[in-house]
């Protein structure tokens, strides 16, 4: 049997929320049980969509880099090229997250360069990407 981690996390959350929290004798314990249940629900969502959301971010970052070429210095341009040719070491979430973090670090450096170069079009596109990324990673709680 292959365990379904998303369902397991949701089931544990429901057990904590409806089986344990109501039987607690203090408001503090009930609040903690509720918080644990909510975090488990978030973990279930992240388990299901985390890799896909990060890979979408990486693809969008690669599209965004095409807009940045005009104002990049040679060092940043080389880093962009390395990133564009990179793939996660595996499909493990930790490897995808590592490449994702590299892309966001690079975005920070490029975005700062865009602000210095008064590249308002790239600046706007970077903020639009960040808004889409935030929406993609938001939890439904």
Image: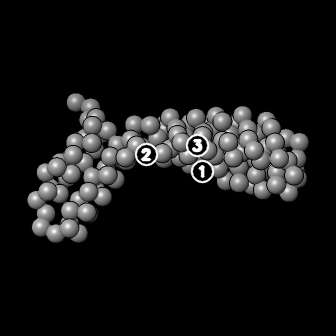
- Name the secondary structure under disc 1: helix
Residue identified by numbered label 3: 133
Q: Are marks 1 and 3 in contact (CB under 8 Å)?
A: no
Q: x, y (%) of residue 43?
A: 36, 47
Residue identified by numbered label 2: 139
Residue shown at the point (10%, 59%) measured from the top left: 23
User: Residue 17 vs residue 141: left or right?
Assistant: left
User: Residue 132 vs residue 65: left or right?
Assistant: left
- Name the secondary structure under disc 2: loop
Give the alpha-carbon distance from disc 2 to disc 3, as whole Å: 12 Å
Name the mark nearer the viewer: 1 or 2: 2
Of 100 and 43, the residue lying toward us: 43
Mark before the other along the chain sequence, 1 or 3: 1
Residue identified by numbered label 1: 101
Q: Are marks 1 and 2 in contact (CB under 8 Å)?
A: no
Residue farthest to the top, as pictured: 1
Q: x, y (%) of residue 42?
A: 37, 47
User: Residue 97 vs residue 128: left or right?
Assistant: left
Q: Quadrant of residue 57?
A: top right
| Mark 1, other Cα within 10 Å: few <14 / some 14–19 / many ≥20 | some
Above or below, 72 relative to 27: above
Of 38 and 56, the residue lying toward us: 38
Residue shown at the point (16%, 69%) measured from the top left: 26
Residue 82 visible from this viewpoint: no
Of 12 and 120, the residue lying toward us: 120
């Amino acid at each position: 049997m292959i365990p379904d981690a998303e369902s397991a996390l949701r089931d544990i959350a429901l057990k904590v929320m409806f089986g344990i929290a109501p039987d607690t004798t203090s408001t503090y314990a009930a609040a903690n049980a509720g918080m644990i249940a909510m975090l488990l629900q978030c973990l279930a969502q992240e388990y299901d969509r985390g890799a896909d959301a990060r890979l979408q971010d990486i693809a969008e970052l690669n599209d965004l880099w095409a807009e940045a070429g005009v104002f990049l210095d040679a060092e940043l341009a080389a880093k962009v090229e390395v990133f564009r040719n990179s793939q996660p070491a595996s499909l493990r979430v930790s490897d995808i997250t590592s490449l994702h973090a590299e892309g966001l670090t690079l975005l920070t450096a490029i975005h700062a360069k865009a602000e210095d170069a008064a590249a308002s079009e790239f600046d706007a596109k970077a903020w639009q990407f960040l808004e889409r990324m935030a929406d993609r990673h938001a939890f439904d709680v």
